[in-house]
Amino acid sequence: MAEFDAILIPGGGLTKTGELTPFVRARLDQALRHSADFYIPLSGGTPHHPLPLDARGYPVFEAIPAAEYLHERGIARAQILPETSSYDTIGNAFFARTVHTDVRGLRRLLIVNSEFHMPRTEAIFHWIFGAAPDGGYDLTFECAANDGIPPESLEARAERERASLQVVRELAARIVTLNDLHQWIYSEHGAYAWFRRDSAYRPMSGAAAETYGGK
């Protein structure tokens, strides 16, 4: 029997040429240390950088190179369930649940993310996978190394993470059902409410930008 029903790997951004960053590869390598019925790489991209294009001019959704990485290291194609609808960590969790885990009855989950991102990841996944109706989820979390990120970038990202974590806690206290979460995502969240895109989709600058890919 596999250790987990599924292992979920949140995205972290691609390079401008559509390649995985070192810290996202570290997440995937950490996931590969465990056995699971399914491996679920998460993320379509990020609002902070335009999607890279492949040689044919089509957008490269982040979960696809991640799926290829997992397959090249021995995971069968049928065991890999990419999720390409999300553009942030909240979306990672929401679409993982509504597209894959609720549908397939996957309940024993391991979520692997970079160490710098783990406190907010835990808060978000506990919030969304705990939203009513109760899915009966058993969540485990595991950190991957912050590979390839300079100290100044880690420090800048840590400041953003602390502020964002407080926002997540406030949201989780007032949005407690999947129905309400869906309404909030598509009416208030800038990455998904179509009429808020102009304010949410913008290039990031500064030291923290390196922790979102795009180089």
Image (cartoon, rainbow, N blue to C red):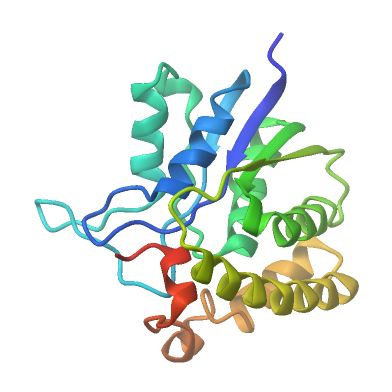
Left or right for 170, reference 71: right
Query: With respect to residue 115, does 28 lie above or below?
Result: above
Task: Please identify the quadrant where the C terminus is shown.
Answer: bottom left
Residue 83 position in % (x across, y down): 49, 46
Name which quarter of the figure residue 182 lies in: bottom right
Left or right for 72, reference 107: left
- Report the front residue among 77 and 154: 154
Residue 190 position in % (x across, y down): 54, 82
- Report the front residue among 32 and 1: 32
Query: With respect to residue 16, does 96 lie above or below?
Result: above
- Report the front residue among 161 and 125: 161
Residue 60 position in % (x across, y down): 28, 53
Residue at (62, 18) in percent of width and height: 35
Query: With respect to residue 115, does 174 lie above or below?
Result: below
Residue at (76, 53) in percent of width and height: 122
Name which quarter of the figure residue 183 lies in: bottom right
Question: Furthest-top residue in view?
Answer: 1
Query: With respect to residue 158, does 2 lie above or below?
Result: above
Residue at (49, 40) in percent of width and height: 26
- Report the front residue among 179 and 27: 27
Residue 52 position in % (x across, y down): 25, 61
Question: Furthest-front residue in view?
Answer: 151
Residue at (61, 61) in percent of width and height: 89
Question: Furthest-left residue in view?
Answer: 56
Left or right for 125, reference 52: right
Task: Please identify the quadrant where the N terminus is shown.
Answer: top right
Tell me how many marks there are. 0
